[in-house]
Amino acid sequence: MNTRIDSQKAHIKLKESLMIIMLVAPALIIFTTFVVIPVIQAGYYSFFKWKGLGPLNDFRGIENFIRAFNHPVFITALMNNLKIVFLSLFLQLPTAFLLALLIGRKGFFGSMVFRGLYFFPYVLAEIVVGIIWKFIYDPQYGIPTFFARLIKGGDIQIGLLGNLDYAFTAIFIVIFWKYIGFHMILYIAGLQGVPKELEDAAVIDGANKFQVVLYVIIPSMWSAIIISVFLSVIGSFNVFDIVWAMGQGGPVHSTETLVTYLYNFGFKRFAFGYGSAIAIIIFFLCLIFNIFYQKYVVAEK
Amino acid sequence: MATVSLKNIGKVYEGNVRAVDNANIEIEDREFVVFVGPSGCGKSTTLRMIAGLEDITEGDLYIDDKRVNDIPPKDRDIAMVFQNYALYPHMTVYDNMAFGLKIRKFDKEDIKKRVDQAAKILDIEELLDRKPKALSGGQRQRVAVGRAIVRQPKVFLFDEPLSNLDAKLRVQMRAEISSLHNRLQATMVYVTHDQVEAMTMADKIVVLKDGLIQQIGSPLELYNDPANRFVAGFIGSPPMNFMTVDVTEEKGKVYIDEGDFKLEIPKEQGDILKDYVGKQVVFGMRPEDLDYHEEEMKDQTIKCNVGVIEPLGAEIHVYVNTAKHQAIARVGPNVKLQVGDTIYLLPHFEKAVFFDLETELAIGREQRRQ
């Protein structure tokens, strides 16, 4: 009797496993074909000097990696990415959070309008955003020039994107503008999961507005914050289109990011071995961050 | 010492929605006051106005003779227990209870002393290191109460605190909150939609409906001397029976006539009804004030058919039908009845209440009290 039940159980288990395999298989095949294999391939190419055509026989070991870290433009690109990460985390996300606090609650007249306005840039394609802002920054008829002429008069031209001192800031403003709505929406979703009763309880307990946010609201929507920080950091490492559209990493490579660097020095120069090495560096930066984040931040939660 | 006094308090929301109208309530020191009423009656809104979580649109609120309309919740020296407990999910039980004290900058030792003491009273000492999600509903409720008592506030406010607990736990927590009240000797205001909670816990009950206070009184006052049909029907379970009847007079005696039966009203009650001869009134009778009779007694019993029988062990609830009305009677456990039986019910007229058909107010309350 028992063995019969056991065999029945085994049968059901087998059926379940088959079902799982069937459902997971398509995604797994696609993921392997388009992600895992190319990464391994890139890893392999990164040890060669290769033009992308012809035989892959000029093995150079880790030379490509050493070259990258000795190249000042690569270091500029890496630092720019780190700056974007830093500024996003400490400027963009807190601002998005404040906006969410301001317009996240239902009942405020016009809150839906504001949400739409702030979210709108996120819907636009990055290239489109880049082109729009290139017009906005245009030295001849752009907005900074317009205001400069308004205030100072005369025939002034303000070319932020062509200025070594301001180009990065100008581009970061666009990144800030484009993604703030996305993070705001994440926080609004998180805020709506915080019961009003919790805030009431904190108010009765004597907390002021700031303390309510700090001790009750932020911890209660920690999941949303974790996701937002994660997406922001990974996104910051992969910035490409906006920078490309607004100056292709120029002037004089001052606004290069890792991905524009890869494109400029890998693809454009047919240095596929070198390009692959850069791609692998980006991949590992993201991977290390991911592992660290999962282990120390997500798991804590 | 803590008294709470509501003077002509009103609450009007945006769009002219009136939630509470002209509420006058005097809450004495150490009193346990229960606001009761169906959902949407304004009882929670009134409580939240006392707490300071809602602005007061009209009238004045005093705590200990001090007008507190414009004083923020944290300075009103009140504590509140919420319906869904509202425990901070990321904090341990200890931190939940200590939060208000920390915010108020109590020193660490004092906080520990107070939390430990409250935990002891509520029997949750073993749970202090746990997070709320690792607690059962009853335990969470205790922690929520604990968070309120550590501060030793002037007034405790409870907003339907037991409505998320299962029936058995609710009865237990009911008793515990009552004994907590005795122990702390604090002023407590308690909101519920459950009239049993109101009856069992309150020193004073405030019955609300549609934002208006219907009656204020002790549980037994409300039960025995309801001001209107709503209070009569709301307080008591099973509820009071209501029948619309004609009042007639024959040879100096007052009768009520339902159509299917006619009852002679004893002189005392009859005098109250004199003004209503020739009109209709609502005849109210509690289920326990209807005695079961097998035989008809002329002009004294209500003839009816047994519809549903609910044996509860100690008593039986019998749902009966007259020609025009339904009624419930509580009869002894040994009465043998079957669905479809014709039975006769003898009302205790000294307990009957009559209501004006139009205003629904109890008739002759002043006379009856004397």
Image: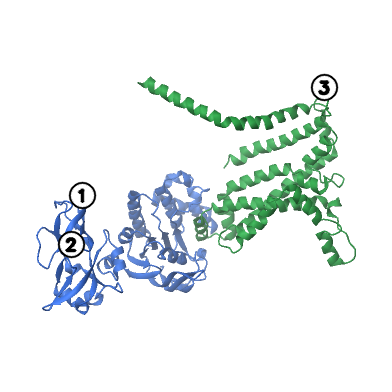
Name the residue: 24% across, 76% down.
B364
In the drawing, what numbered circle is on residue B313?
1
Q: Disc 2: which chain?
A: B
Q: Which quadrant is the N terminus of chain B positioned in?
A: bottom left
Where is residue A194? Give x, y as percent: 53, 53
Q: Do marks 3 and 1 both belong to one polypeptide chain?
A: no
> What hue does chain A carry in this figure?
green
Q: Amino acid at mark 1?
A: Gly
Where is residue B208? Give x, y as percent: 37, 67
**Residues packed near mark 2 inside 10 Å, few (<14), some (14 to 19) or many (20 plus):** many
Taking B95 as reference, is A151 left or right?
right
Label 2 sits on residue:
B290
Camera-side residue: B206 or B63?
A: B206
**Residues packed near mark 1 inside 10 Å, few (<14), some (14 to 19) or many (20 plus):** few
Camera-side residue: B237 or B151?
A: B237
Label 3 – label 2 distance at C-alpha: 106 Å
**Which scheme is used to colour this image of the protein?**
by chain
Label 3 sits on residue:
A57
Taking B251 as reference, is B308 left or right?
right
In the image, residue A236 above or below residue A67: below
Quarter of the rendering containing residue A44? top right
Label 1 – label 2 distance at C-alpha: 19 Å
Where is residue B182? Give x, y as percent: 34, 59
Q: Disc 3: which chain?
A: A
> What hue does chain B carry in this figure?
blue
In the drawing, what numbered circle is on residue A98?
none
